[in-house]
Amino acid sequence: MNCNDILSTQLLENPPRISVSEAIDIYENANLNDLMYVASMARKRIVPGNEVTYLVDRNINYTNACTINCQFCSFYRPPNHSEAYTQSYDEISKRVSELEDIGGSRILMQGGVNPDLELNWYIELISRLHEEHPNIDLDCFSPIEIEGIAEICQLSTREVLLSLRNAGMHGLPGGGAEMLVDTVRLDVSPKKGTSNNWIRVMREAQELGLTTSATNVIGFGESASDRVMHMDLIRNLQDETSSSYEGFTSFISWPVQLQNNVFGSRNKGSNRTELGATSSEYLRHVAVSRIFFDNIKHIQASWPTMGMQVAQLALSAGADDAGSTMMEENVVSASGTNKTMATEMELQKIIFRSGFKPRKRDSDYNLLKTTTLVQSDVYANPPMQI
Ligand code: SF4
């Protein structure tokens, strides 16, 4: 089958699962408009209706001390660096209260692999937040942080996850997947471990009933085949776990940022045009991911890295979720990205302007009640900054 035949097949009412080689073919050869059309049809099949969801949440980066030294990271500081910090329980709890004040439902709390924090520090933090903010979902840490805690405390990652879940942790976000291709990982973050480590910890989290998501960073110079292999590892895990457990709720991708980090400066002036990703390349990636993941329900558009206008286009390339307000963000913004927080109304506006109806959701994609803009407000003055 040529690439157009593959796309035509995906338009059938019950299309066959696209294979890895077919996905690579359409990634490399399909016309972008065709790809976006087929992806938007897949979206209608998997998430019927005309609604696009969003989440009101807050990012909390509780510590920036980290020993992993990923070359693409502009956020971390070595543990004894003068700019290294760890927030106190009171500071973190205050931030959660501020989220409650604006009707938020979830915090996404992530930081570095801090060798000075023992498991009990994390358990006490989660217990306290759970007690003080019982209506807020606590989606916290990432597989590499869990591995770091396990190593410090000489426990298994499963034991760490179990303790955190029992303390009140709701989910383990999929941060740190970046590119699940070991040659790429070894090059840009050799201390982060292999793809299998990330997959193993996520499998354990899913088996323990934690809410999980899958992520993907593109633009390290990898091939289309590498990108599809990343998706394939995730699709395989989803096949394995989603029959008994919830599995990944969503897939979220964005391009690597090249400002203020070793990876960017290492390649500065090298004229490697394949680094990072252009808007059209990002849209291609979103579209292929929608067609590829017949077993993950939601595909998220990433406005903090691509900007609001490209995120709007992603909603026509198969994405059915506009991400979250974030309220506070310190990781992507450390790479020089200007806009890394949005109001609920801003997200509603970009959804309306893309031709969809906004719906507020929680971390598990349950729909929530909220005040929705009326159509006449969508283009009201002053014009929204996007
Ligand atoms: S990406 Fe995470 S693990 Fe890597 S250096 Fe930054 S904070 Fe540490």
Image (cartoon, grey):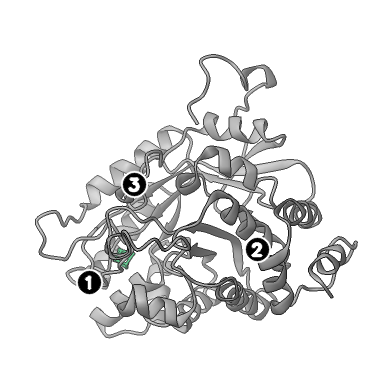
Between disc 1 and disc 3, the foreground one is: 3
Q: Is mark 1 within 8 Å of ligand 1?
A: yes
**Badge 1 or badge 3: first in the primary sequence:** 1
Q: Is mark 2 within 8 Å of ligand 1?
A: no
Query: How far is mark 1 from mark 3, CA to CA?
Result: 20 Å
Quarter of the figure with the N terminus: bottom right
Viewer-side residue, 4 vs 61: 4
Name the residue type under label 1. Thr
Can you see residue 325?
yes
Q: Which mark is residue 289?
A: 2
Per the image, label 1 sits on a secondary structure element best described as loop
Query: How far is mark 3 from mark 2, CA to CA?
Result: 25 Å
**Badge 1 or badge 2: first in the primary sequence:** 1
**Badge 3 or badge 2: first in the primary sequence:** 2
Dividing the image into four quarters, tell me where ligand 1 lies: bottom left
> Residue at the location (27% across, 72% down)?
68
Q: Which residue is mark 1?
A: 67
Does residue 164 appear left or right of residue 385 in this picture? left
Does residue 352 appear left or right of residue 329 in this picture? right
> Residue at the location (49% across, 79% down)?
181
Q: Which residue is mark 3?
A: 333
Q: Position of residue 260 (x, y in %)?
A: 27, 54
Can you see residue 364?
no
Q: Residue furthest top?
A: 381
Query: How far is mark 1 from mark 2, CA to CA?
Result: 32 Å
Does residue 256 appear left or right of residue 224 in this picture? left
Q: Is residue 254 above or below residue 79?
A: above
Per the image, label 3 sits on a secondary structure element best described as helix
Q: Is residue 50 above or below residue 382?
A: below
Name the residue type under label 3. Ser
Does residue 57 appear left or right of residue 148 in this picture? right
Whether label 3 touches label 2, CB < 8 Å: no
